């Protein structure tokens, strides 16, 4: 078994490498915006790097290796002077306005306001070479049209609406501060610091900043962990790549060190974390293909709808909520998660067995009849979710025919998420087909709940 598994793993790696070598790319290093960016960084102390900006057929913009990169090699070292942080903002022309404002701004808002003001300055901005290569729009939920929000999975839709509302709240609650900066603006503050401008800045910080802890100060409130890193932020995410990324207090540089080798002319990736595609879409605006962390979430509303004939359902749902068992209920290609099956086992019990509810959450195995009920219910949940995926994909197909370019880009991201969801649910249903027999073999070694009463 081990030998066969090793060969399969090697074959999979070879297939992946062949696909990667076939990906076409075009260098962008001679384009004026990137020439200006590199000059800007070199003036601030950035040394040479074995990477260049390139356009890849599968991911869009990224960084390409100009020569082979060895495992453990320092790939990128960006000096502190190249990083855009709250300290940069406080030492800029915005500093006096922020320092005297009460209540204090958050580091996130300070960075957003700075980005908007720098973009407003155009080529007169010191940071123009960086601002100029930032995306003009994003495919994050804060940008999603209502039609796009409507075809999201229900849980993602709720969080997407929360994101959009959070950005609106930031804008509306800081209007007085925005107007206080009128002396440094060439146009009315309400025309410069619009909701659309703040949304762009918020998405720029949220999707492109690296984690970098800063000491607290008297002028800002809240956790200060953002740093915008020009050039470095062109690195794309891939789930199976490992890197070491952190700020080096000795060299005073933000450093990326590769944990794996990259051949010459291949795209160099980093890893944003072990995130499923729902989180990647919500936080970064993209879906990663072949993501091993991807799952489909089962929301409490769907559980209640499927089991609405159970007279004791409200009490069971309350118990699950009180024990933090109503969130993170998922299915993967391998089958339902332990948390979901545990919740279903509890939901299979009548109220007369209330004394066993806690034991079930701790892993108590039930009788075969209740185990089979839990598996059947898991199948029903997957079938309902699959129906929803098919309906959403049909709707997306229709919307793509009559939407503008920006909305089509948003729809393609959601389409990828829904396609993945469909594949996961199909595989999960196949896994569940064999579940009863396997459960029976397992349960023959376990005490039955009915025997324990």
Image (cartoon, rainbow, N blue to C red):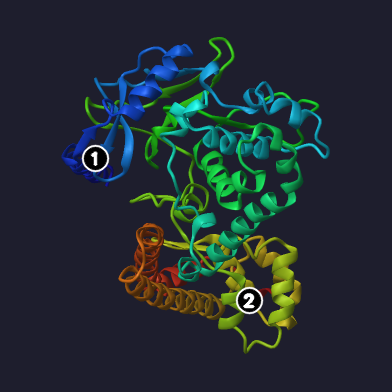
Q: Quadrant of the C terminus?
A: bottom right
Task: Work out whether 384 lies above or below 257.
Answer: below
Disc 1 crowd rating (10 Å Cα; few below 14, some 14-19, many 20+) is few
Count of labels shown?
Answer: 2
Task: Work out whether 382 lies above or below 233.
Answer: below
Question: Between tags 1 and 2, which lies in front?
Answer: 1
Is tag 1's residue or tag 2's residue first in the polypeptide sequence?
1
Q: Residue furthest right?
A: 102
Q: Which quadrant holds residue 243? A: top left
Do residues under tags 1 and 2 come within 8 Å of each other at their CB atoms? Answer: no
222 or 90: nearer the viewer: 90
Q: Residue 175: x percent and y percent?
A: 72, 48
Name the residue: 66% across, 43% down: 189
Task: Give the label on residue 347, or none.
Answer: 2
265 or 261: nearer the viewer: 265
Give how far apart the Cα atoms at labels 1 and 2 are.
43 Å
Q: Which residue is mark 1?
A: 13
83 or 435: nearer the viewer: 83
Residue 80 in the figure: left or right of residue 102: left
Q: Which quadrant holds residue 302? A: bottom right
Name the residue: 28% across, 26% down: 29
Camera sees residue 444:
no
Task: Work out whether 402 lies above or below 215.
Answer: below
Camera sees residue 380:
yes
Residue 424 in the figure: left or right of residue 152: left
Q: Secondary structure at mark 1?
A: helix
Q: Residue 133: x percent and y percent?
A: 41, 34
Q: Which quadrant holds residue 431? A: bottom left
Residue 161 in the figure: left or right of residue 42: right
Name the residue: 47% across, 79% down: 380
């Amino acid at each position: 078994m081990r030998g066969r598994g090793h060969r399969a793993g090697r074959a999979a790696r070879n297939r992946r490498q062949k696909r990667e070598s076939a990906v076409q790319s075009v260098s962008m290093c001679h384009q004026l915006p990137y020439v200006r960016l590199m000059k800007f960084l070199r003036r601030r102390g950035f040394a040479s790097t074995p990477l260049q900006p390139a356009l890849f057929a599968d991911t869009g913009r990224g960084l390409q290796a100009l020569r082979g990169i060895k495992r453990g090699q320092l790939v990128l070292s960006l000096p502190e002077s190249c990083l855009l942080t709250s300290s940069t903002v406080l030492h800029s022309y915005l500093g006096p306005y922020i320092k005297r404002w009460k209540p204090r701004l958050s580091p996130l808002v300070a960075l957003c306001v700075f980005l908007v003001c720098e973009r407003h300055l155009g080529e007169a901005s010191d940071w123009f070479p960086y601002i100029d290569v930032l995306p003009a729009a994003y495919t994050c939920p804060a940008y999603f049209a209502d039609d796009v929000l409507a075809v999201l999975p229900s849980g993602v839709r709720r969080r997407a609406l929360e994101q959009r509302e959070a950005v609106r709240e930031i804008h509306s609650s800081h209007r007085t501060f925005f107007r206080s900066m009128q002396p440094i603006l060439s146009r009315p503050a309400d025309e410069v610091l619009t909701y659309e401008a703040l949304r762009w800045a918020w998405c720029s910080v949220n999707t492109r900043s690296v984690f970098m802890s800063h000491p607290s100060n008297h002028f800002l409130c809240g956790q200060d962990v953002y740093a915008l890193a020009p050039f470095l932020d062109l690195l794309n995410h891939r789930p199976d790549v490992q890197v070491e990324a952190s700020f080096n207090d000795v060299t005073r540089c933000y450093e990326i060190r590769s944990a794996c080798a990259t051949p010459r002319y291949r795209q160099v990736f980093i890893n944003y974390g072990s995130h499923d595609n729902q989180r990647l879409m919500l936080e970064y605006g993209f879906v990663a293909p072949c993501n091993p962390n991807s799952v489909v979430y089962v929301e409490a509303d769907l559980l209640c709808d499927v089991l609405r004939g159970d007279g004791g359902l409200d009490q069971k749902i309350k118990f699950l909520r009180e024990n933090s068992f109503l969130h993170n209920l998922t299915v993967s290609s391998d089958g339902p998660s332990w948390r979901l099956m545990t919740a279903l086992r509890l939901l299979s019990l009548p109220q007369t067995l209330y004394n066993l509810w806690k034991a079930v959450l701790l892993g108590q195995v039930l009788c075969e009849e209740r185990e089979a009920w839990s598996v059947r219910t898991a199948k029903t949940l997957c079938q309902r979710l699959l129906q929803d995926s098919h309906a959403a994909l049909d709707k997306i197909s229709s919307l793509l025919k009559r939407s503008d370019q920006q909305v089509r880009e948003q729809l393609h991201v959601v389409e990828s998420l829904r396609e993945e969801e469909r594949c996961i649910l199909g595989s999960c249903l196949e896994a569940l087909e064999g579940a009863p027999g396997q459960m029976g073999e397992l349960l023959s070694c376990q005490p039955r709940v009915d025997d324990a009463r």
